[in-house]
């Protein structure tokens, strides 16, 4: 990579301003096109038949009656998606999840699909498909699934990560461990020890836009896919591999996205739509219903976590230990592993040990959900930290400040930290007016910290300068949180031009090199690095063209504030040349002017946040109301502060829903009881106060502008901050998320009864 | 020669050692030598391992050099949301 990513400490003109968002008008007028808004001539309607059983052998599928129905153009089963994964276990799981092969592994697992001339015919056809199931015992609870007598979901799974190779298969796919020091010795030095167990229920990302795509496979083997996704290049790779296509023959265009939060990083419907189109010879549109989104797309893990933390009487943590059990759905994952890595990441610990267990259950395949796995671990740890601070007799903020990690601290997951922001966020919270505001009766205040890694990855950007001097920016990371605006600001900064001269688009997979998906809070971090690199490459060409126009050496030309400037006394009579003037002559000086960049953006800086929350609890009903909420988070550098604040607020809002209401509820039959927004209640505006934000900027040393990811960290502290607030308001420690009214009332009544 | 710290699960595959010494100048060579010395690592390397060099996590840069005396930590390659 011929690009120096180190932080340069420059002053900014465009970066840090708040221009109007480029996609705003289209979104508020309805012009913006989301996944389901695309249509093609001759398009069919796709529908998926799903298992009503949590666990069942598929003995026989008879599609003959459906195929004979007038208007049905294709019916597919697993036979139409043969295993081409060549031993790649993770891809095989994706294939099996898209279309069950020998067993249905959860309520909602796809077992067949049809493409028909209209939705009514497609629905009728689904009813004509006959499936002979042998229903098997099931397990949906993470703790029950670990028991020896639990129904075995996959008899080929033997627990990884144990000292001795197991001889029996298990629902526990992996054990992972992190830490350093000697926790036994550390607890021996503790004057106070808090030990508690916590549970969190499974939640969905709750994006407003359901999964939707249009697939069109041509008889020559090429194909187009229009889809709502966080990563169209990754979708192309996965779909091409699953369907046996060459990736370059499949062109994937990402639509606008109505929320993803990690849930649109996996393919579900897309390979099915392509297989239907291939069989029918016509385009197929496949849009999931909300019921299908809940039953068959990516929820996060349900968890069960044990925490033990000890501290000396002067408030120093002497040892910290966690055992984390995370459900993975019916396929192997690494969710508890992430929880084990993030659990104690905020703290400076001499003795720490975390152990994670990945657990198979008959629920949908777990998918990433915004800082995946970290919020649940933070809930357990930060609840115990709050309780420990009280036992020691130190203010919870002061206790955390005393024990906060800092530059040079060995993190709980291993490496030593560089410059980090946990201390500054805590100091900011300590001094925030919110912490001093009076509380009324039945109100409680809580605060909590959170950590997330942030990631980089493969990234490409094309920057093209038109002959009129306007600039188009083609990026490959899907804009899930305002990256077109922030990347335009970055390009404007580098080129020294006005934001209004730029137009950024998300290019399709045939127009740009491979990009990793927009996950891990990497969109602005990675693509801004590639944009800076592309702009600098364009500036090099602009200088060369100016040198030609002046007939002087390029070394005598510098780029300053959007202009080529001839330096040196001998060129003193030459006026500046603007980007527009150079672009106007480009046809005569060598052709189009562009800058490109293909790089791996590594070195994403970790980020920390601390949240404050005030809650009112009705002691008669257990009902809660969020009175006030404040987010303090390190952004490294906020490129477009309004978007950064939006990310902070969005994370808090999602966290409030997760903490207080949201929950997958399964019946004894293993079927999901609440697959709709009426019974699975996400917060609406009237549930939320204005969420205040404070942006801190501790530069990431591995980005030219100091940028860190900001999208995910904001969902890490809310579960804990709200749990601490509810616990303080209700006078009883809450250990089970969500803290729904019945759960709070039960806890209050249990406390009253002693 | 660089000293590489392994996380718990990888340590189990290295006979319980939590630190190993490897003669490697960059991440690519590190992975190659580790796979040679500890064949059990190979599936983990194929699945994805991140390398933290003095606290900065690298997931994809094979050419990243490993400075003498640097803290080098292997971590699972994680996904975000």
Image: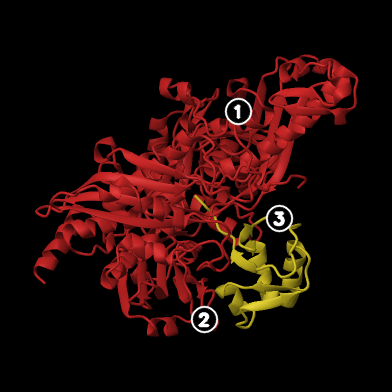
Q: Which residue is mark 2?
A: A166
How many neighbours does mark 3 have within 10 angstroms: few (below 14), some (14-19), or many (20 or more)? many
Q: Nearer the viewer, mark 2 or mark 3?
A: 3
| Element at label 3 | loop
Image coordinates of residue A450 in percent, x first then y, are 42, 56
The residues tagged by marks 1 and 3 sit, at their Cα atoms, a distance apart of 27 Å
Q: Which mark is residue A504?
A: 1
Label the yellow chain with its letter: B
| Element at label 1 | strand
Vertical side of A599 occupied by B11: above or below = below
Q: Which chain is mark 1 on?
A: A
Vertical side of A482 occupied by A52: above or below = below
Residue at figure coordinates x 40%, y 59% from the top left = A301
Image coordinates of residue B40 in percent, x first then y, are 66, 75
Q: Is residue A732 left or right of residue A415?
A: left
Residue nearest the observer in this picture, A657 or A66: A657
| Element at label 2 | loop
Vertical side of A59 occupied by A390: above or below = below
Image coordinates of residue A215 in percent, x first then y, are 56, 34
Label the red chain with its letter: A
Residue at figure coordinates x 51%, y 73% from the top left = A177
Q: Residue A592: name its quadrant.
A: top right
Q: Is residue A394 left or right of residue B50?
A: left
């Amino acid at each position: 990579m011929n690009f120096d990513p180190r932080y340069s400490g420059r002053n900014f003109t465009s970066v840090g301003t708040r221009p109007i968002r480029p996609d705003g008008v289209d979104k508020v007028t309805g012009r913006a096109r989301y996944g389901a808004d695309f249509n093609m001539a001759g398009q069919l309607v796709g529908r998926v038949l799903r298992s009503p059983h949590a666990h069942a052998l598929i003995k026989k599928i008879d599609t003959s009656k459906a195929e004979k129905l007038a208007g049905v153009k294709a019916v597919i089963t697993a036979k139409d998606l043969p295993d081409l994964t060549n031993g790649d276990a993770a891809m095989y799981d994706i294939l099996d999840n898209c279309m069950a092969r020998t067993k249905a592994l959860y309520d909602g697992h796809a077992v067949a699909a049809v493409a028909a001339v209209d939705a009514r015919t497609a629905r009728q056809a689904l009813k004509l498909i006959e499936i002979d199931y042998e229903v098997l015992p099931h397990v949906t609870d993470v703790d029950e699934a670990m028991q020896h007598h639990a129904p075995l979901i996959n008899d080929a799974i033997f627990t990884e990560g144990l000292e001795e190779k197991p001889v029996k298969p298990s629902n526990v796919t992996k054990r992972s461990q992190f830490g350093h020091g000697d926790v036994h010795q550390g607890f021996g030095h503790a004057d106070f020890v808090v030990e508690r167990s916590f549970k969190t229920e499974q939640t969905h990302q709750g994006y407003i836009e359901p999964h939707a795509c249009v697939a069109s496979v041509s008889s020559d083997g090429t194909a187009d896919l229009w889809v709502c996704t966080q990563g169209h290049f990754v979708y192309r790779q996965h779909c091409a591999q699953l369907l046996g296509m060459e990736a370059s023959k499949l062109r994937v265009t990402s639509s606008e996205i109505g929320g993803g939060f990690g849930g649109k990083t996996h393919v579900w419907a897309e390979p099915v739509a392509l297989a239907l189109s291939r069989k029918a010879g016509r385009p197929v549109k496949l849009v999931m219903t909300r019921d299908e989104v809940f039953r068959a797309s990516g929820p996060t893990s349900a968890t069960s976590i044990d925490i033990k933390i000890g501290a000396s009487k002067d408030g120093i943590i002497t040892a910290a230990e966690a055992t984390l059990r995370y459900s993975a759905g019916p396929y192997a994952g690494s969710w508890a592993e992430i929880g084990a890595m993030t659990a104690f990441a905020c703290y400076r610990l001499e003795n720490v040990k975390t152990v994670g267990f990945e657990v198979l259950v008959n629920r949908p395949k777990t998918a990433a959900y915004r800082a995946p796995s970290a919020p649940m671990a933070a809930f357990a740890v930060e609840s115990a930290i709050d309780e420990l601070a009280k036992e020691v007799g130190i203010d919870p903020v002061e206790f955390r400040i005393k024990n906060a990690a800092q530059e040079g601290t060995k993190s709980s997951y291993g490496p030593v930290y560089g410059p980090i922001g946990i201390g500054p966020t805590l100091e900011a919270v300590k001094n925030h007016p919110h912490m001093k505001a009076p509380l009324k009766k039945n109100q409680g205040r809580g605060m909590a910290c959170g950590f997330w890694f942030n990631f980089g990855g493969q990234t490409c950007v094309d920057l093209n300068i038109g002959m009129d001097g306007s600039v188009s920016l083609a990026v490959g990371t899907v804009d899930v949180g305002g990256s077109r605006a922030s990347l335009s600001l970055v390009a404007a900064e580098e080129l020294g031009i006005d934001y209004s001269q730029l137009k950024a688009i998300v290019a399709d997979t045939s127009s740009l090199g491979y990009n990793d998906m927009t996950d891990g809070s990497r969109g602005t971090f990675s693509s801004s690095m590639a944009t800076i690199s592309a702009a600098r490459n364009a500036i090099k060409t602009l200088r060369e063209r100016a040198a030609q126009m002046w007939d002087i050496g390029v070394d005598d030309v510098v780029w300053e504030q959007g202009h080529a400037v001839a330096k040196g006394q001998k060129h003193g009579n030459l006026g500046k040349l603007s980007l527009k003037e150079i672009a106007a002559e480009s046809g005569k000086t060598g052709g189009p002017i562009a800058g490109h960049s293909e790089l791996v953006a590594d070195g994403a800086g970790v980020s920390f946040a601390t949240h404050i929350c005030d809650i009112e609890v009705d002691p008669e009903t257990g009902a809660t109301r969020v009175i006030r909420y404040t987010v303090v988070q390190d952004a490294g550098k906020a490129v477009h502060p309004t978007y950064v604040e939006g990310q902070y607020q969005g994370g808090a809002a999602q966290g409030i829903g997760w903490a207080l209401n949201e929950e997958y509820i399964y019946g004894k039959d293993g079927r999901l009881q609440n697959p709709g927004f009426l019974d699975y209640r996400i917060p609406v505006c009237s549930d939320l106060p204005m969420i205040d934000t404070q942006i801190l900027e501790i530069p990431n040393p591995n980005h030219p502008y100091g940028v860190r990811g900001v999208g995910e960290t904001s969902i890490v502290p809310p579960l804990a901050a709200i749990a601490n607030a509810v616990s303080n308001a209700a006078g009883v420690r809450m250990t089970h998320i969500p803290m729904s009214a019945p759960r709070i009332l039960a806890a209050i009544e249990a406390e009253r009864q002693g | 020669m660089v000293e590489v710290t392994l996380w718990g699960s990888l340590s189990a595959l290295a006979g319980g050692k939590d630190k190993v010494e490897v003669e490697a100048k960059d991440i690519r060579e590190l992975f190659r030598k580790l796979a040679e010395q500890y064949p059990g690592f190979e599936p983990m390397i194929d699945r994805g391992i991140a390398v933290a060099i003095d606290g900065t996590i690298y997931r994809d840069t094979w050419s990243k050099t490993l400075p003498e005396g640097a803290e080098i930590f292997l971590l699972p390659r994680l996904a975000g949301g």
